[in-house]
Amino acid sequence: MHERTALEPSLITAYQNTLYRVLEGGGCVLRVGEPSPPLLALYRSHAVSCAAFITACNPLSQLLSDAENQQRQAELAAELARRSLTYLEGVGQSASGDWPGEPSFLVLGLALEAAKTMGRAYGQNAIVWCDAAARPELVLLR
């Protein structure tokens, strides 16, 4: 499935099992591979057909301090605002609770290639991109 990647299989599995929680706009939980009716409703209300769940925290899965992650997230939020993109606060959390959640954003209407470029710019191993059917998919960037 992901035959050409520098990422460890255990890390990919962790990303696939993460709960991607959207905290605003009525809230919803996105799971890789599972279509999300609440996300589809968000699409309709914002007149978009795709979205990306992205963070600037902990680049390349290297833990940073809370202050460093907050600064990185503020920079990402400023970039999204400069680009006039609609985004909602979120958090990526381990389903088992064995690691703290990462502050994230659900960016509405962000096309796949633009999402990949943004993820790479913020040093991420992967992003979650959601297609027109509101089905989240894990997109590896390394």
Image (tube, grey):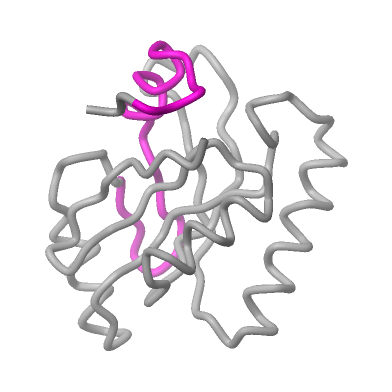
Quadrant assignment, res 47: bottom left
- Relative to 89, residue 16 above or below: above
Q: Which residue is at a point 45% across and 55% down the rendered structure image? A: 23
Counting from the top left corner in percent of width and height, residue 22 is at: 41, 54
The number of callouts visible is 0
Q: Which residue is at a point 67% across and 55% down the rendered structure image? A: 121
- Relative to 128, residue 111 above or below: below
Quadrant assignment, res 134: bottom left
Counting from the top left corner in percent of width and height, residue 38 is at: 20, 62
Counting from the top left corner in percent of width and height, residue 71 is at: 84, 52
Left or right: residue 125 versus residue 75 is left
Counting from the top left corner in percent of width and height, residue 37 is at: 13, 60
Q: Which residue is at a point 85% across and 41% down the rendered structure image? A: 68
- Magenta-highlighted residues: 4-29
- Relative to 16, residue 75 above or below: below
Q: Which residue is at a point 38% across and 28% down the rendered structure image? A: 4
- Looking at the picture, tell me which residue is in the foreground, 87 or 138: 138
Residue 16, magenta (yes or no):
yes
Quadrant of the frame with the N terminus? top left
